[in-house]
Image (cartoon, rainbow, N blue to C red):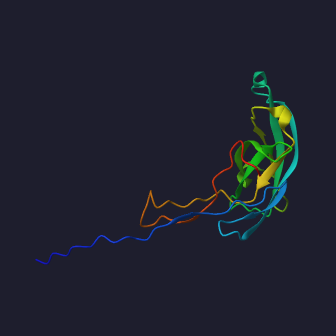
Amino acid sequence: MILALSGCASWGCTDTMAERGEAADRVQVVDTDGQPLGVTAAIADWSLGPHPQVPSEGDRVHFHFRFEGADGYSDPAVDACAVDRERVALGCQTISSSQAFGPADGPLTGDDWLAVEHPEQVAGVLLIPNDQSYDRRTCEVDVKDGGGMHPPEPPSAGDRL
């Protein structure tokens, strides 16, 4: 009988966060290496008003968005943030091209709502260009197959964009 013992070796797993891109109302969506995906995301318009399903909760930010260049196989996602005049995030959430609809040969359009604590301070809605649709496993979860570049941390209220 041959007994083989495998040595415990470090896999050298490392997790790295991509740098957050410049927020704007129209962005070129980029992967974790900063390379363009060939998709543009844009805010078409926004307004304040009560959400029709929960009007008693007060005003929310209703915004319309557009994805150009997205196909049915990929589902790029970006973070949308309501910001004040100083570009400080008041509330954010991730939106994806699968939330939008449109003709096969045209841009995909959709809308969503953001709840913010002080809607009267909203001066605009910005998008962050980093694709949030795929975040590989971390080293903590899977030392063997995890690691590598991950999207930046999602923005939260108080972050300056």
Residue 128, compared with residue 61, is above or below; it is: below
Q: Residue furthest bottom?
A: 2
Which quarter of the rendered picture does the N terminus lie within?
bottom left
Residue 31, compared with residue 83, is above or below; it is: below
Q: What residue appears at the point 79 percent right and 25 percent down from the top-left corner?
A: 58
**In the image, residue 38 lies at what x, y percent?**
77, 68
**In the image, residue 157 lies at what x, y percent?**
71, 42
Q: What residue appears at the point 84 percent right and 36 percent down from the top-left corner?
A: 121
Horizontal side, residue 14 vs residue 50: left or right:
left
Residue 27, compared with residue 5, is above or below; it is: above
Foreground residue, 14 or 30?
14
**In the image, residue 110 lies at what x, y percent?**
80, 47
Residue 122 sits in which quadrant? top right
**In the image, residue 120 lies at what x, y percent?**
85, 32
Q: What residue appears at the point 78 percent right and 59 percent down from the top-left corner?
A: 22
Foreground residue, 30 or 110?
30
Foreground residue, 70 or 92?
92
